[in-house]
């Protein structure tokens, strides 16, 4: 056996396990969801007790989903959430990464671990913890604000979206920060030294060297944040029993969950999930189209 064929077989040996799991747990579920969304269950007999069958309905489920005011409202709400959440997340992650990159070596390991620690807390647990901190009567934060004369209802209709933004930012900012720190650490230190010799200050180095060279990581973090934001599910589901401001149509994922497991309408849920995936693709690829071309053009 030639060396080339041996290397090719070794390469396939590494790639094949990933390809199998990727196909089984990513590609096939997507294809099955699209397939399910094209059908509808029809029940016969009195009260639908005589049996049921699946009927091919083309895009009727998509039309029904887009004509459902509750689902459309959930899409608008998640887009508003993304408009606030994405800039907050990216700006905070960039700021933390720049602080760690500029800090002294002694304090960096501690603060890097401290910033990253919330990411190790599962989303459900984090939502439960923050739910207690938002609930009047048991929250030390609410009690302190009340003592200061500030009556803030974190679980009220006007504030619940910002409260969820706080949970998501607290949990994922540290992860995004590590991605950016890794990119900043890959920059050649000689560039900084040359800039200082030319009279550049700290801010000039940040704007003209660090941020431009960290652009690929910033773009990647932004795309991940866009996709993750549009998939919001665990936080509102956990907070729902604590407030009347959240219902089962608060986000698109909650709406699909409600259709599938409360209404037993898996076909409609599949259509709503596919529509949400299309929205996420449009925004993520649109962002890449606008801001991800700098590396190729340079």
Image (cartoon, rainbow, N blue to C red):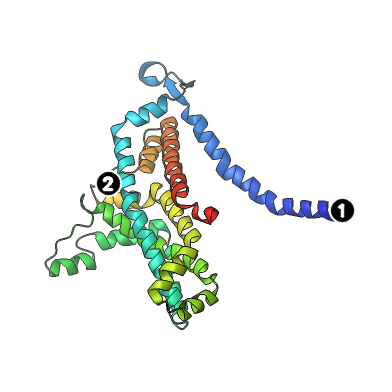
Element at label 1: loop
Q: Position of residue 298 (x, y in %)?
A: 53, 57
Q: Residue at x 44, y 65 (%)?
A: 211
User: Which quadrant of the view contains residue 163?
Assistant: bottom left
- Percent across and percent down for residue 186 are 55, 69
In the picture, measured across the screen, residue 109 lies left or right of residue 95, that is: right
Residue 115 location, quadrant: bottom left
| Residue displayed at 41% across by 50% down | 226
- From the top left corner, tell me how far across and down residue 86 is, in percent: 37, 54
Q: Nearer the viewer, residue 196 or 115?
A: 196
The answer to whether residue 117 is visible is no
Q: CA distance from mark 2 to mark 1?
A: 63 Å
Q: Residue at x 43, y 73 (%)?
A: 205
Choose the circle earlier in sequence order: 2 or 1.
Answer: 1
Badge number at residue 246 = 2
**Residue at the extreme left:** 149
Report the residue marked by disc 1: 2
Q: Is residue 191 left or right of residue 230?
A: right
Q: Position of residue 48 (x, y in %)?
A: 39, 20
Q: Residue 247 versus residue 174: which sits nearer the camera?
A: 174
Q: How many circles with numbers are drawn on the protein?
A: 2
* Callout in the foreground (2, 1): 1
């Amino acid at each position: 056996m030639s060396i080339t064929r041996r290397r090719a077989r070794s390469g396939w040996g590494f790639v094949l396990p990933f390809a199998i799991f990727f196909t089984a747990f990513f590609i096939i579920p997507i294809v099955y969801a699209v397939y399910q969304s094209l059908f509808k269950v029809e029940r016969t007999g009195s009260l639908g007790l005589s049996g049921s069958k699946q009927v091919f309905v083309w895009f009727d489920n998509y039309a029904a989903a887009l004509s459902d005011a509750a689902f459309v409202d959930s899409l608008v709400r998640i887009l508003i959430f993304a408009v606030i959440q994405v800039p907050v997340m990216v700006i905070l992650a960039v700021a933390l990464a720049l602080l760690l990159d500029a800090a002294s070596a002694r304090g960096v390991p501690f603060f890097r671990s401290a910033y990253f620690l919330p990411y190790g807390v599962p989303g459900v647990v984090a939502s439960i913890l923050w739910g207690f901190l938002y609930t009047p009567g048991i929250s030390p934060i609410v009690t302190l604000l009340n003592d200061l004369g500030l009556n803030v209802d974190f679980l009220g209709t006007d504030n619940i979206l910002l409260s969820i933004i706080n949970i998501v930012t607290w949990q994922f900012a540290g992860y995004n920060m590590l991605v950016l720190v890794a990119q900043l650490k890959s920059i050649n230190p000689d560039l900084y030294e040359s800039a200082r010799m030319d009279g550049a200050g700290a801010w000039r180095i940040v704007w003209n060297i660090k941020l431009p060279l960290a652009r690929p990581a910033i773009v990647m973090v932004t795309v991940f944040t866009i996709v993750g934001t549009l998939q919001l599910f665990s936080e509102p589901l956990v907070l729902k029993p604590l407030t009347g401001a959240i219902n089962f149509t608060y986000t698109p994922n909650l709406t699909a969950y409600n259709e599938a497991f409360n209404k037993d309408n898996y076909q409609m849920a599949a259509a709503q999930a596919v529509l949400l995936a299309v929205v996420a693709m449009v925004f993520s690829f649109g962002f890449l189209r606008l801001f991800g071309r700098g590396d190729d053009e340079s």
